[in-house]
Amino acid sequence: MEKTIAAFFSEMNRLGRSKNTIDGYAVDLRQFTRFCGPKLERESFSGLAKEFLTGLTEQAPRTVRRKRAALKSLANLPDSNLTTSSLREFPSGSPRPCVITRQRSSS
């Protein structure tokens, strides 16, 4: 997972995402990986993400939406092999996950 997260932030930087978005997502993903611990290597990313988000009852709705967007953006990384089917629904007005696509090299 560490390599996937490093690749994710490398791609976010390459695409010129804002420093605030990158910093916020870094905090969110650090909290998520700390929450998961070793389970992250053997259990479903989608299930752990849902469990993590469900446990954020003390957080403001906007904060929870950003954390959900961070997790979905990570899962959208090409070749990440992560799924977020249980995170499909976004409340109205929530931040959207960053779309990361590979640029094709021109020959």
Image (cartoon, rainbow, N blue to C red):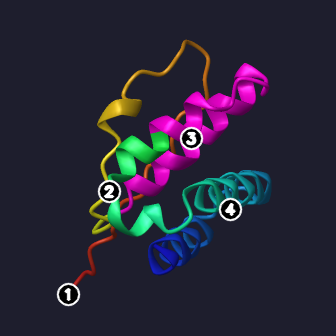
Q: Earlier in the sequence, mark 1 or mark 4?
A: 4
Q: Residue 38: x percent and y percent?
A: 49, 69
Give the Cα separation between the discs numbered 4 and 2: 17 Å
Residue topped by disc 1 = 107
Task: Give the amino acid type for the residue marked by disc 4 in the picture.
Answer: Arg
| Residue, far top | 92
Eyeballing the image, is 73 above or below 63? below
Residue topped by disc 2 = 82
Please tell me which residue lies in front, 36 or 60: 36
Q: Nearer the viewer, mark 3 or mark 1?
A: 3
Are circles 3 and 1 on residues that touch, CB within 8 Å?
no
Residue range (magenta): 50-77
Task: Give the amino acid type for the residue marked by disc 1 in the picture.
Answer: Ser
Are circles 4 and 3 on residues that touch, CB within 8 Å?
no
Give the Cα separation between the discs numbered 2 and 1: 31 Å
Q: Nearer the viewer, mark 4 or mark 3?
A: 3
Task: Give the amino acid type for the residue marked by disc 3 in the picture.
Answer: Phe
Residue displayed at 44% across by 49% down: 99
Q: Quadrant of residue 86?
A: top left
Residue topped by disc 3 = 52
| 105 sits to left or right of 8 | left
| 53 sits to left or right of 24 | left
Q: Is residue 25 magenta?
A: no
Residue topped by disc 4 = 30
